[in-house]
Amino acid sequence: MANLVSLAKRRGFVFPASEIYGGLNGFWDFGPLGIALKNNIRDTWWRDMVECPPIGPDGKPLSIVGLDSSIIQNPKTWVASGHVAGFADLMTDCRETKGRYRADHIICIDVQYQKAGQTKSFAGWLSTLDGDEAEANLLKKAKKMVQKSGGGDIIPFDMATAKAYTELSADERAKVIGPDAENAGTLTEPRKFNLMFETYTGVFQNEDSKAYLRPETAQGIFLNYKNVLDSSRVKVPFGIAQIGKAFRNEVTPRNFIFRTREFEQMEMEFFCPPEESRTWYDFWVQTRLKWWEERIGLAKAKLQRREHASDELSHYSTACADVEYKYPFSEPKFGELEGIAHRGNFDLTQHSTHSKTNLDYFDQENNKKYLPHVIEPASGLTRGVLAVLCDAYEYDASRASPEWLRIKPSLAPIKAGIFPLVNKDGMPEMAEKLYMDLRQSFTCQYDAKQSIGKRYARMDEAGTPFCLTIDGDSLKDNTVTVRHRDTAQQERVSADKLKAYIAEKLA
RNA sequence: GCGGGUGUAGCUCAAUGGUAGAGCACUAGUUUUCCAAACUAGCUACGAGGGUUCGAUUCCCUUCACCCGCUCCA
């Protein structure tokens, strides 16, 4: 991973944001090659979603249209979506252990024990983090404390009587012994941690002008659902796709560009009849997994589908699956790349209620009115770039250029390097002519500097799949050496056929 | 947020309480007919702030960033 980060900076894929001021936690900039790669992934997604959408189960192309909604929307949007409440989790700190916990994840219980025929209480309520091992943890803790106070028998307790820290009164909170603490009352009052970026519209800053940078692009789609229906002649089932920046004050930005506070999403909301939703959910999970593998070229062995457990699902979601990739930092585990959520009609219901707007769809064929259900494939473009870089990174000490990026040719920032083998004897002239021709079809780079080996190596690090070299023979027979990045093998191709040759390899 | 680690040139790494070095990369030139060749010249650094000191890149404090492990993660 360190090698990749180093290469990414050296060749201009990714730089730390505002680096000359010491950087900023959770923000990264894309350099010349990085933005080219990102745009290529983005364009592939847009083409495969909007311009040439997949073929549906009925053998016909799906209907999906594009959208670019504003990053800042009326703040009521985020009240309706649940983000104002949901993105402002109550957190509590422990003064004793310096730990930080989500307040609603701490469960507390008043455990008692018997000693010499008397029922006794501890000096405080025991607490632990919610989860499968909560009861075992509490029991272990209770035993330890009983032992410390001279022995006794713990009276069996019922987990159903346990309460979340947030449900306790101030007096009761003062009695709680933190999950990892030994003394009571060391937990702070629950505090709000707003994960949304706040800003203000207009020049006067007050509560009325407060607005939010979107934490996801999806809500902009729901807000425009009715506009699209009224203007685009689409019929359910159909999708609306959008690509754009989103912002979240992540608690812990980590792992290069995996979790950042500003990132880019590629989201599509697919509206369908409620009774067909499960079918479409399965369709999209499969389609998306295949897309990363076939269109982006990620190694099949490093991709997996992971179905969310029922207790992991959001309150509005009836199913959710992740497309996961085995990143170097997540190994041996996988990390999220895309989430495909079955959102039901939660969002449309919320926005319909909060905006007092009827968002029902009228199905003329069946003369029915209903709120469509929504399947949402939402992927991180920024994470896509990371996955592609991780997947493409190769190291082979036996090569003249040990490090190279095996990026799928169609996504490569530069498609071909064009070199005169020697910078004289008519070679540069012919190479320049070839460059001027090919640059109109592909992103090319002309390079006549230094030795041929260095030029190949530079292109290898940039992930350029082809290098075209003009040598003495080229001038005589009009052929060019095509050198392949992955194998360093060479073949001669007629200069006239190069355009078609490269086009075929990029397909 | 906690604990540990790391911050010196574009990259990888040295050294030092007293003028900061190397390799590679990069730029210019010479040379060069297929894999980071050679030669010459050139550019470039002690993350930031404060303290101790005659003098700090080095010692101390603070801060920022990155990495690892926890915690968190729509």
Image: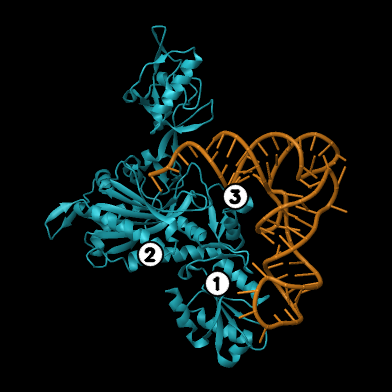
Mark 1 vs mark 3: give the one in front: 1
In primary-sequence order, the first of circles 2 and 1 is 2
Query: What chain letter is assigned to the residue under label 2?
Result: A
Q: What is the CA distance from the residue labelled 3 to the residue labelled 2?
A: 32 Å
Q: Which chain is orange?
A: B
Q: Viewer-proximal residue, A330 or A234?
A: A330
In primary-sequence order, the first of circles 1 and 3 is 3
Q: Viewer-proximal residue, A502 or B28?
A: A502
Q: Do badges 1 and 3 share one subunit?
A: yes
Query: What chain letter is assigned to the residue under label 1?
Result: A
Seen from this angle, which residue lies furthest left?
Answer: A367
Q: Do badges 3 and 2 share one subunit?
A: yes
Query: What chain letter is assigned to the residue under label 3?
Result: A
| Residue type at the position of mark 1 | Arg
Q: Position of residue A249 (x, y in %)?
A: 47, 44
Q: Which mark is residue A485?
A: 1
Labelled pair 3, 2 in contact (Cβ < 8 Å) = no
Tell me the quarter of the image containing the C terminus of chain A.
bottom left
Task: Tell me the colour chain A is drawn in.
Answer: cyan
| Residue type at the position of mark 2 | Trp
Q: Which color mode does the image show? A: by chain
Q: Which residue is mark 3?
A: A23
In primary-sequence order, the first of circles 3 and 2 is 3
Instruction: Look at the numbered disc 2 and give the secondary structure of its residue.
Output: helix
Q: Position of residue A125 (x, y in %)?
A: 42, 20
Q: What is the CA distance from the residue labelled 2 to the residue labelled 1?
A: 28 Å
Q: Viewer-proximal residue, A354 or A33?
A: A33
Q: Viewer-proximal residue, B15 or A190?
A: B15
